[in-house]
Every structure is written in structure tokens, then in C-alpha cells.
Image (spheres, rainbow, N blue to C red):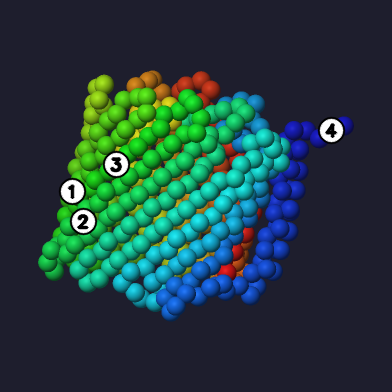
Amino acid sequence: MYPAPNAKKSQQKLCTTLLAAGFVVVLGLAASKARAIAPIGDDASLFVTGVATIAYNDNIFLSDSHAKSSGVYDLVPGLSYEYGTNNALTKGGLQVYEDFQEFSSYSSINNQLFNAVFSNQYEDATSKINFDASMHQIDQPQRDIQANNYLVNRNVYHIDLTGEQKLDASSSIGAGVIFDDTDYRAVGYSDLKTTAIPVNYYLAVDPKLDFSFGGRVRFNTLEGGNDSTDVYVDIGARGEFTPNLTGEVDVGYNHQEIDMGRGTSGLGADASLTYAYSPKTNIVAGLTDDFGYAADGNTFRNISASLGFNSAIDEQWAIDGTATYGYYTYLAENRQDNFYTVQAGISYIVNLNFKVRLGYTLYDNSSTVSGASFDDDIVSVTGTLKF
């Protein structure tokens, strides 16, 4: 007699977890004497980095039916150059890494993905300037794309330059330019470029709390579709709301004007809060209400909320978890999606340079469009190394 399908899945998950545990232990032994491979002067260092993940994914294509499962193996070697670590006015770094991604059941979709991330921050008594740039090659499905036998390959580019200047002892002004580009490598999807220009005025109402008002203009350029312009006007606050509650909140009015279509308006929001429940435990919450584009070029409004925590059990053990709900309303078609994500994990810090995490992720999308619903469970073990 053959095991039932559910029993087979349980056995596969168990085997994957055991293999992962053995693999990351080997990495831990290699990291026992880890240190920077090349100190560069007194204020910069070059590190070798590595991430190894072994996972079991029971719906690798996010299909509505006939879900296909597989073991997924990611080996991500890289280099990290870091500078400004000794209280310098300027600090930042460059990370370059390659993701070797393999699937035990579908070797035809194995891939090798390049990634690079640069960041630079300057801060003195009166001004702050941040510059970030990144390039990621991604080969994964996403919530609004379901396929039966292939992943969704795309290059994602990001550049932003933001700054803030004090005007006097109690006020400052911030502005920036943020550029994002999603370039799909397969036909049937709409490449998207966005350029956002935010401007905000901040007024101190308390030594640790600022009131803010301002807005953002965002230009969206869609290949083969309707371009649009988003205008968001908001008020908000940032800083320390109570001794234990910190973060930034803004709410306002959002309007999207489509070049060849009817514009739409509504409330907008962006919030990120952290509550220090105890010296070792933080509770984090977020809220977003904004417009966006799906991979097929259709516009939507997304209202999402998240609630999570992270807690250090002791010097070596930590736990974390996050639950997120997103409601997507498509503006050009009769479609609504309810998207749920749950993530949880437990981490073990072997030393300052190596840690291991056992994680679980659930994705669940319920859509009014036939064939667009799915659920996906992922169990993973990840080892992270830096020396």
C-alpha cells in the first residue's frame, strides 16, 4: 500500500528539514572563527557573505489547481564592502551576491540570479542625505500571476535620493526623487517604471515628536498600457508618541489620473509603528492604502495591514512572526482579491557571524476571478554567514 498524498507531503517536509539542519551545521562549523577577510584602513572592511536555504514549497507556481511541490535549494555567496563604521558622518556599503536557485522536482527552471545593493548615508547637525541603488534578478511567481509550468523572471531596479535640511531649531524640510523599474523577461507582462517626488515639512511639537504635512507626485509609465500620475497630499507625525511607541504615520487624499481612462480618488495612508513591549520584545504594525499596477498592466487599489513581533528569548535564541492582510480592488475589471500572509520563525545565533533560522510561510489568495485563487505553504531552514 502506498502512503496517502498528505502523508507523502509530511514525509517530504520532514526530510527537507533534516537535510537543511545538517547542512547549516556544517556552515556553522566553518563560521566558528569568522572575521573580516580584508580590513581596509581604519574605517572600512570587506566581508565574505553566504546564505544557504533548504525549503519545501507545496505550490511553487502559485496555481489555483494541480499545485506542484518541490524542494527548493538556494545557495547565495557574496561580498560586502562596508565603510564609515566608526561614527563617521558618511557611512554605507556595497553588497554583491549571486543566488543559485535549484528545484529538486523541476530542474528545467533552475536559475542563477545576480543581485547588487549600494547604500550611502550622510548626516551632520543640520542635514541628512541618503542615496540607495539596487538591482535584483527575480525568478518567482507573484500574487497576481499564476502559471502552471514556469516562474516569472524579471529584473527590478531601484534608485532613490532623499534628504532633509533643518530650517531652524524646530522645523525642517525633506524632499527626494525615487525611481523604480520592473523589467519582465517574458512576453505577456507589462514593464513598469515609476518616478516619485515626495516633499514634506516637519515641525517639532515635542523634543522627540514632529508634526508633518506635504505630499508626493508619482509618474507611472507602463509598457503597452495606460500611463498615469498619482498625487498624494497628507498630514502626519513621526518620532516618539509615547516612551514605548515610536514610528511614522501619515494619512491623506490620493488621486490617480490615467492618461486614457477615468481617474479615481480615495483615502491614502502609510504607517509604520514599533511598540517596545519589553526590553527583549517588540511589536510592529503597518498600514498602507495606495494605488498600484499588476503585472498584466491593470491598476488596483491596495489596502493592507500587518502585525508582527520579534523577541529575544536569551542571547542566542529569538522568535518572530508577522501576519499581513491585503485587499486589492482592480479599477478596470470586476476583481477583488483578499491576500493573507503568515510568517513565523525561530533563530539560533551561533556567534556574531553565523545564525540559523527555521521558518514557516503561508500565502493564501482568495479572488473573485476564476483561477486566481491559491494557497502555498513553505517550510525552510536558512543559515546566514558573514566573515
> 311 above or below 64?
below
First of labels 3, 1 by sequence position: 3
Q: Which residue is mark 2?
A: 174
- Separation of residues labelled 2 and 3 (CA atoms): 17 Å
Q: Quadrant of residue 11?
A: top right
Q: Which residue is mark 3?
A: 195
| Residues packed near mark 1 inside 10 Å, few (<14), some (14 to 19) or many (20 plus) | some
The residue at the far left in this view is 168
- Looking at the rendered structure, the kind of residue marked 4 is Tyr
The residue tagged with tag 1: helix, strand or loop? strand
- Separation of residues labelled 3 and 1 (CA atoms): 17 Å
Q: Which residue is mark 1?
A: 214
In the image, which is nearer the foreground, mark 2 or mark 4? 2
Q: Tell me, yes or no, whether the two marked residues, 2 and 4, touch with CB atoms within 8 Å.
A: no
Q: Which residue is mark 4?
A: 2
- Looking at the rendered structure, the kind of residue marked 3 is Thr
> 236 above or below 90?
above
In the image, which is nearer the foreground, mark 1 or mark 4? 1
| Residues packed near mark 2 inside 10 Å, few (<14), some (14 to 19) or many (20 plus) | some
* Residue in view at x 66 percent, y 50 percent: 54
Where's residue 316, x and y in %? 58, 70
First of labels 2, 3 by sequence position: 2
